[in-house]
Image (cartoon, grey):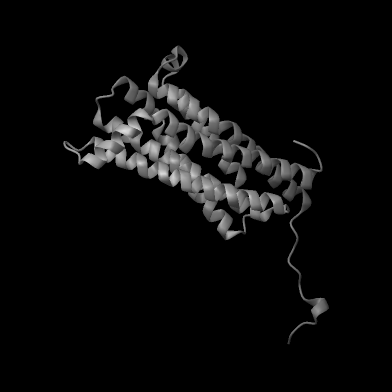
Amino acid sequence: MLLPATSRPMPEPIPQPELLRSLGRLVRGLSALFWGLPLSLVVCFHTAMAREQFFRFYGFLPPLVVTGLLAYGLWQLGDFQKQERVWRTALDRARVLSLVNFGLSPFLDWWNKVPSNAFFTISVLTLVCSAVLFLGSLNLVLARLGAMLPDEALRVETRQFTSLNVNLLGFTLVMVLIYIGASRLPTLPPWLTVIVIVVERASPWFLVILVLLPLAMTMAMLWKTKQVIFENVFGAEP
């Protein structure tokens, strides 16, 4: 026998303290990602190049710390909206890539010390591809997160920036794979030789447009998302 509408059991609401704790972890995770992204780029680059005495002295520890900070930030996001399957799928994908980056980061120092080692070279190239995929997956995480927050402007911005960043990063990954494959071939067709020369000579500009631009826009989305949480949930500025 069906119960009257007034007597049907209602789903239990999330306790307020638990909701506030999950939002607090969400804000901490966004902050860790915001600061971890530029630190990871700077530290990993200098570790691979070994231009600073600091990175030579500490070896592989600095890249482990900064990539671990990114993994920590993503794990802090996991307590928010655990029942949302699409959100959890995007978050888990980014988590896996963050662990791959964390595990491969020591090879930057080892490759710098022994650049002729083929295994170290392959590991560093794998780390580069994984880092590009990680930044793209992080954009998808922010897009899913923005869709769950009560701010229409944030939803529109995250959709637009995510689409642009994913396209730029996809093009970057294709160029990296073409360059890696072409550099391993003994002879190249003329059109491929032109691409390799352009990439080598214009690499600083490619870095600015194809890597730093998506990185900057991702950081802007992280900050904007944290600001929306503070304004709409806690009623304060970050």
- Number of numbered markers: 0
Q: Quadrant of residue 191?
A: top left
Q: Relative to residue 61, is residue 149 depicted above or below?
A: below
Tell me if 138 is positioned left or right of 18 in this view. Answer: left
Q: Position of residue 40 (x, y in %)?
A: 50, 30
Residue at 77 percent across and 48 percent down: it is 17
Residue at 42 percent across and 22 percent down: it is 47
* Quadrant of the image containing the N terminus: bottom right
Foreground pick, 131 / 18: 131
Q: Position of residue 150 (x, y in %)?
A: 73, 54
Furthest residue toward top: 53
Residue at 30 percent across and 38 percent down: it is 195
Residue 86 seen in the current view: yes
Q: Relative to residue 50, is residue 185 depicted above or below?
A: below
Q: Relative to residue 134, is residue 37 depicted above or below?
A: above
Tell me if 222 is positioned left or right of 109 in this view. Answer: right
